[in-house]
Every structure is written in C-alpha cells, then in structure tokens.
Image: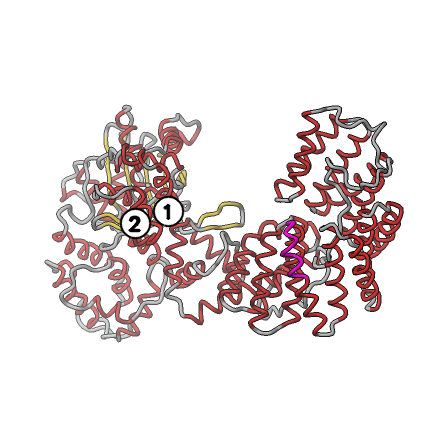
C-alpha cells in the first residue's frame, strides 16, 4: 500500500477507448504517489496468478500510449499494486474489457447463442465420446440427481479437446438432450493476443443471451452469477466453456440445476472445481491418425503410400493438431507425395508442422509462457534429460533441487498437461513436447546445460554403484564423489535389481550423453558398474557398446589401465555373443597392456579370459597351459574369486578333452570356492557344468539334481542366462530318462527365456525341439553311448561353460 495519495481517485468509466484508459492508468499512478516502475514491478509480480518475477519494462509498457491491447490480469495487478480498494477493482476490470471490445467484431468475450460448427473432419474418439455421453445422460441416484453435471475435457495442447467437446455437444442436442439452451464461450485461457475472458463479462453476455435486458443486469460478479443460476433453473441447458484458464474462471459460470450440463475444455487440470468429472484425453491411435490424414489429404493419396503415411503419423506422434496441420499442408500442395511430406517432417520436426498461418510451435509457446519461471526452468532442463522417462529423483538431480521440490514441479507440469505419468511415480514427455523441450533447452547457457548433465550423470553413477554393491557385484571401481547429491540407497538385492531393470534405458542414454560431453569418470566407470546386472540380464550388446566408448575415451587420455579394464568388459560381451575372432583381438590387446604395465594381477585376469576363449574356440589343450599360469598369478595375489574362475575353466578344458573325471574334480573344487566367496552367478555356471558332466556319465538323476539347484538359484538371483541354461539342462535329463514330453516342455520354456534375452543358445534349444517333434523316439536312453570319446553330442547345447572375470 502506498503511503501518500493526492487528489481524487481517477474514474476508469471515463475511458472511451484504449488510449484514454492508458492515460487514466497514468493518472492512477500519480494518485498513488508515482512509485518507480522497478518498485511497482515487484509489487505487481507478487499479485499475479501465479506469482512471478516481472521485468520492469513489462510494467512500464502498460503505461505507454499507442498500445493496441493490454493484458487484463496484468492491468488488474497494477491497479491493486497502486492501492485501489478491492471494491473499486471491478470497475477498472470492466473498463479495460470495454475499451478492448471495439477491436473485436464479436465483442469482448465471443459468440453466443449457438454451438460452434461440428467439423466434418472429426475423427475417432469413440470410447472418449461414449464416456462423455454416458456421464451427461445417465440417470444419477441420491443427492447427485440434484446437481449439475460438469465434465472437464483435459489434455495437452493440440490433442483435440475442443473438437471432441463440440462434437459431443452436437450429438447430445441432436439426440434430444439439453434442447432448451446451448451457450458457448471461448474463455481464452491460452490466447496469443488477448487476456483470459473475465467471468463477470461472460456472465453479462450469457444473461443477455438468456433475454435479460442490459439495464437489469447487476454490476457485481456474484450478483450476476446468482441471476445466471436463477435463469437456468428448471431448464435443460448445455454450457460449453472452451479453453478455460483455471477453476476460478469457470466456477461462477456453472449453473445449479440437475438438468444442466457443463462441458469444459482446458490444458490445465480442473480437479479443484467442485463436482467435476475429469476426462483426460490422450493422443490418437495409429488407426485414428491415418483416418484423419485420409479425411483431410484424401483417401487415394494416403492409400498410395501407406509406409509414408505411417512415417507422418510417427513424426507427428499421433497428436491430432500436428496431424491436421501436416495433412492440410499436404492438401495444399498437390505436387507433393506423402514421402515428400514425411521427409520434411523428419528433417524439420516442429518447424515443419504448419499449414498457412497456423503452426504447432506457437501453441506450445502459450503453455510454456503460462508457467512460472521455476517451472519453466524445470521444463527446459527436461530437454537436457537424455532418457525416455524420469522420476522426481532424476529431476532433482538434473535440476539440483530437493526431491520434494522436484516432485511438486512434476505434479504442476502434469496439471498443465506438459508431462504425463505413464506409471505411478514415472513421468514422460510426449515426443513433440520433448522436441519442444529440447528447443527451449537450447536457450540455456552452456554452463547451465553442462552442470545439469554432470549432476545427472554423477547421480546415476553413484546410484548404480550403490545398487551394484547391494547385489554383491564383484570388481567394482571406487565410487564416484556424490558431492551435494543424494544418490539412492538399496536395502536388498531385489530392490537393486528392480531399479536396474526400471532404469536401464535411462542408464544407457545417460552414459552416451556423458561420453558426448566428455564426462570421463562416468564414461569409464558406469559400464563396469553395470556389468554384473547386464550379465544377469544378458544385455550384452549394450555392454559392448558402452565398454567400447569407454575404451576410446581412455585411449584419448592415454589412460592405459582404464582402457585395459574396459577392454576386458568388451571381450566378455563379444565372447558371450559368440563373436570369437573379435573377442580374441580385444583380450589380446588388454593382455598386452597389462604386461607393458607389469601388472601381474591384470595379466592373471586377462589370461583367465583368454583360456576361457580358447575353450570356446576348440583349443582346450592350449587353454590348460594358459589357465594354469593364470591361476598361479591369481594365487600370488590371494584372489580367491579368480582362482575359482580358473578352476571352472580348467574343468571345461578337461571336459572338452573327454577327461570327465578331471573335469568333475575341478568343478567340485570350484563349487566349494564359489560358495565360500558368495559367488551366486559362478555357482550357477558350475552347477550347470556338473549337470552336464553327470549327464555324460549316464547319471541322469544326479544331473537333474545339479540342474535343479542351478535353476532355483538363478531364478532367485534374476540370472536369466543361467536360468534358461538350467531349464534346458533339466529337459536334457528328462529326455535321457525317457520322459520326452516333459523334456520338450522344459525346452520350450528355456527357448522362450533365451530368445527373450537374445542368447545364441536359443537356436540350439530350438533345434532340440525340432528334432523331438520330427522324431519323438530320437533318443533311446538305454542304448545311448555317452563314452564314445565325443564329449559334444550333436543335438545338445548344454556343454560345459566357462566364466569370465569382468562381472
């Protein structure tokens, strides 16, 4: 409140046009003691809805002559900031609306008396339309029968809310509902040129439409609302309130009678409106999207190039407005094919979605500009998030804010329909809004962008290290410094594994982004931290890509120990993917680095993996010498885990040479060591190997026991690779017992598991199924010769397997 006022308060009713109104604003500022624009901007910003920081120039421009229009909310905030009593604020509001009306042929608030045209291009929305019609016409029981029906149609910009509401309104009236009165208003909640419609002015126009003479219309908003409700009492009325800004704008426009229906559309959630039933509208289905293209661009053109039509749908991400603009642009260019349009959309995306003077980007601009500055910042930073979705914890890391603040921001952005919640606690951006967020993110400073990605990458690295530790993952690098971040903590192996499963796509994307931004620590550590999880889930391709990126980054810095460490990880993936020639080149390079560095620990590890590779490529005799040397080096360093791995791989060597007794001995020693080390994955590998050896020794029942133990442990630990292997082994043992039908059932399950994770073993299991179907009596266990010197039967895949050291 100003402390010194001079003269009489200016009367806004004297304003005949906008120029006179601006002049009266100047007089009001003088009456308030001529506060500076800087001081006034601070006061006005706090009075805006929602509060915001206003530039001094924005407030100063309100007082400049020559304005073509004014922002009504800004004007009212200025009037209040200058000390006008609340009782007088309404007269300034009415005067502001009045002086804008001559500039619009349809008056200050829109067209009344009839519903807007129901467009011929209206497409789909069958389920949504049925829900709206049902909500409007179903007889309600109890107290609800005495209340008005309010349905709010909510969704992101461009999703087709208005068309759905108009179509529903026409259908209801056509079917004999709400035939007494139909009122419609564009409330201009999001308008590029004009402020939101003032509810008091809307009530005045509605009352005129309802036959109330102008002199009888009350001046006050609450009195007008009361008269409006009275005029609609006992009348079957449909009120269509399009493009609402918020609940407050709508509240007084709702009649009270049970025979009335209010349809409201808004980009914002109107959940705070009493008695409202929200109808959240999503994007089109693929079929609806193609049908809209057909209706606008023509069936023959779309049918002539269905692949290009699918591309257009994909680039518009099934957003109705984007599709309509793209199709209208195509219709106006007869020389273009659908491929021409698809190519332009692929190249230009947001900028290419336009037709004539209409475009998609300005529609999104209105939603963005309606946010407070802190929310605008969060939205911009979402454009820097490289992954497909995000949680409050992820956004907290990205923005450097507390988790509860991030969650509140996401809830507000969801209320604005700028983000959506696909699953509880997980949010995502529509693809076109993602493209828009990326564009707005480009306005961030380089420092802000780099800091955001650095915070996110370090948070993911620290949280992943915490999860890997909870899973007892071996061979982890030192944890990264979390700084002010609060990485996640996990109280169980199961919780850690579930987090990895959920966040894997984000971890992949974050690692790529960190490498592109040259964030070295995350680039080289994250692939190693993820190895144990990826081995359990057979994410070998992702692991290989990440390790190769890390190797290149280390080479650029001449960081040979890190390069060798990640070469070992790359080798493990190549080996499991059966890309043996590449694997040998990679492990040889790692071995060479360790020898040049005189790192005998690393040399022992690399030799162990090389010996394992020799087994896989049919060189078991050479493998024995290499593995024996590896075991000696590992024993020198007291590395019990790697000694155990050498024992496993030596057992495989002897198995491949046909010496099943020696193989059995090494496997049993390794099993004891694995259990003492808590090596669950190694234990599964060894149990599967023991099952294989005993199956070769015609001890099917004993083999079944080993495979069953492996299946149980791998299922509990989430080790999909060994789970599929053990299931297949159980099928082998049942087949050896003559229980072929049961065996095929296990093989089918094993094939499904191994196919799902992309394991090469799936093809071999499929061959077992094929042969059993072709010849159910393909094996007679009574005459099977398992001691013929060939330890690798032609139709089985479960040969003994080695294990590496990188996980």
Q: Is residue 568 visible?
A: yes
Q: Return the residue nearer the eye: 343 or 583.
A: 583
Q: Return the residue nearer the eye: 416 or 428.
A: 428
Q: Please identify the dominant SS of the magenta region.
A: helix
Q: Secondary structure at mark 1?
A: helix
Q: Secondary structure at mark 2?
A: loop
Q: Return the residue nearer the eye: 110 or 460.
A: 460
Query: Counting other residues with Cα less than 10 Å from the Cα at mark 2, is it few (<14), some (14-19), or many (20 or more)?
Result: many
Q: Return the residue nearer the eye: 179 or 553.
A: 553
* Rendering coords of residue 489 (x, y %): 65, 59
| Drawn side of residue 90 relative to residue 303, left or right | left
Residue at the image position 14 percent from the left and 50 percent from the top: 104
* Rendering coords of residue 348 (x, y %): 32, 54
Residue that mark 1 sits on: 315
Residue at the image position 16 percent from the left and 55 percent from the top: 100
Whether residue 673 appears in magenta in the rendering, the answer is no
Task: Report which quarter residue 773 is drawn in.
Answer: top right
Task: Report which quarter residue 318 is drawn in.
Answer: top left
* Rendering coords of residue 659 (x, y %): 86, 47
Whether residue 584 appears in magenta in the rendering, the answer is yes
Residue at the image position 18 percent from the left and 59 percent from the top: 69
**Mark 2 and mark 1 residues within 8 Å of each other at the beta carbon:** no
Return the disc, 2 or 1, that comes first in the chain's sequence.
1
Residue at the image position 36 percent from the left and 29 percent from the top: 133
- 731 up-or-down from 2: above or below: above
- Indicate the quadrant containing the C terminus: top left, top right, bottom left or bottom right: bottom right
Q: Is residue 496 visible?
A: no
- 24 up-or-down from 613: above or below: below
Query: Counting other residues with Cα less than 10 Å from the Cα at mark 1, is it few (<14), some (14-19), or many (20 or more)?
Result: many
Residue that mark 2 sits on: 353
The magenta span reads 577-587
């Amino acid at each position: 409140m100003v402390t010194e006022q001079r003269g009489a308060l200016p009367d806004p009713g004297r304003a005949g046009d906008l120029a006179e109104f601006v002049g009266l604003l100047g007089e009001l500022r003088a009456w308030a003691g001529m506060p500076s624009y800087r001081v006034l901007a601070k006061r006005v910003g706090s009075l805006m809805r929602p509060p915001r920081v206003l530039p001094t120039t924005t407030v100063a421009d309100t007082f400049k002559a020559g304005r073509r229009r004014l922002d009504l909310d800004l004007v009212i905030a200025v009037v209040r900031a200058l000390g006008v009593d609340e009782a007088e604020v309404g007269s300034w509001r009415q005067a502001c609306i009045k002086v804008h009306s001559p500039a619009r042929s349809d008056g200050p608030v829109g067209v009344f008396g009839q519903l807007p045209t129901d467009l011929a291009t209206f497409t789909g929305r069958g389920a949504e339309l049925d829900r709206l019609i049902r909500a409007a016409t179903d007889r309600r029981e109890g107290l609800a029968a005495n209340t008005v029906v309010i349905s709010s149609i909510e969704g992101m910009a461009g999703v087709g809310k208005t068309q759905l509401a108009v179509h529903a309104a026409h259908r209801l009236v056509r079917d004999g509902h709400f035939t007494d009165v139909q009122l419609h208003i564009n409330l201009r909640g999001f308008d590029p040129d004009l402020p939101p419609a003032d509810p008091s002015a809307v009530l005045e126009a509605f009352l005129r439409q309802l036959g109330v003479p102008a002199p009888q219309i009350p001046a006050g908003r609450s009195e007008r609302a009361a008269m409006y409700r009275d005029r609609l009492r006992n009348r079957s009325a449909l009120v269509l309130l399009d493009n609402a800004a918020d609940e407050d704008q709508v509240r007084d426009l709702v009649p009270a009678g049970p025979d009335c229906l209010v349809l409201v559309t808004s980009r914002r959630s109107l959940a705070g409106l009493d008695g409202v039933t929200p109808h959240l509208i999503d994007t089109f289905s693929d079929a609806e999207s193609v049908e809209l293209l057909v209706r606008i661009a023509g069936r023959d053109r779309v049918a002539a190039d269905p692949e290009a039509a699918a591309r257009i749908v994909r680039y518009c991400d099934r957003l109705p407005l984007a599709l309509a603009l793209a199709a209208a642009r195509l219709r106006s260019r007869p020389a273009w094919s659908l491929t021409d349009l698809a190519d332009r959309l692929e190249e230009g995306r947001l900028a290419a979605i336009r037709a004539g003077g209409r475009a998609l980007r300005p529609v999104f601009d209105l939603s963005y500009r309606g946010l407070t500055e802190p929310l605008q910042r969060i939205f911009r930073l979402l454009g820097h998030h490289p992954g497909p979705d995000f949680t409050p914890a992820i956004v907290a890391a990205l923005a450097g804010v507390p988790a509860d603040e991030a969650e509140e921001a996401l809830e507000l952005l969801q209320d604005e329909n700028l983000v959506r919640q696909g699953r509880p606690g997980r949010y995502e951006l529509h693809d076109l809004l993602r493209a828009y967020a990326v564009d707005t993110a480009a306005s961030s400073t380089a420092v802000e962008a780099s800091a955001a990605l650095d915070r996110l990458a370090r948070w993911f690295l620290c949280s992943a290290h915490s999860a890997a530790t909870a899973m007892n993952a071996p061979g982890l690098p030192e944890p990264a410094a979390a700084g002010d971040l609060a990485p996640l903590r996990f109280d169980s192996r199961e919780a850690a594994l579930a987090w990895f499963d959920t966040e894997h796509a984000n971890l992949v994307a974050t690692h790529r982004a960190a490498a592109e931004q040259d964030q070295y620590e995350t680039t080289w550590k994250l692939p190693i931290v993820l190895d144990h999880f990826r081995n359990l889930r057979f994410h070998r391709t992702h692991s290989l890509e990440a390790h190769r990126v890390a190797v290149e980054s280390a080479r650029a810095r001449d960081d040979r120990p890190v390069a060798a460490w990640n070469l070992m990880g790359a080798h493990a993936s190549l080996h499991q993917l059966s890309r043996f020639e590449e694997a040998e080149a990679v492990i040889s390079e790692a071995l060479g680095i360790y020898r040049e560095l005189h790192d005998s620990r690393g040399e022992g590890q690399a030799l162990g993996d090389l010996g394992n590779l020799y087994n896989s490529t049919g060189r078991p005799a050479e493998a024995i010498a290499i593995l024996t040397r590896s075991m000696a080096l590992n024993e020198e360093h007291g590395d019990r885990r790697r000694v155990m791995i050498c024992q496993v791989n030596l057992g495989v060597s002897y198995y491949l040479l046909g010496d099943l007794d020696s193989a059995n001995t090494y496997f049993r020693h390794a099993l004891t060591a694995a259990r003492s080390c808590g090596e669950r994955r190694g234990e599964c590998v060894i149990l599967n190997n023991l099952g294989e050896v005993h199956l070769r020794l015609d001890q099917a029942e004993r083999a079944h026991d080993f495979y069953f133990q492996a299946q149980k442990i791998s299922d509990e630990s989430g080790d999909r690779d060994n789970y599929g292997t053990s299931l297949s082994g159980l099928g082998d043992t049942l087949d050896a017992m003559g229980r072929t039908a049961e065996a095929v059932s296990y093989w089918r399950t094993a094939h499904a598991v191994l196919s799902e994770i992309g394991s090469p073993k799936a093809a071999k299991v499929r061959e077992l199924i094929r042969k059993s179907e072709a010849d159910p009596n393909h094996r007679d266990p009574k005459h099977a010769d398992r001691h013929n010197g060939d330890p690798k039967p032609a139709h089985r895949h479960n040969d003994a397997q080695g294990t590496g050291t990188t996980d």
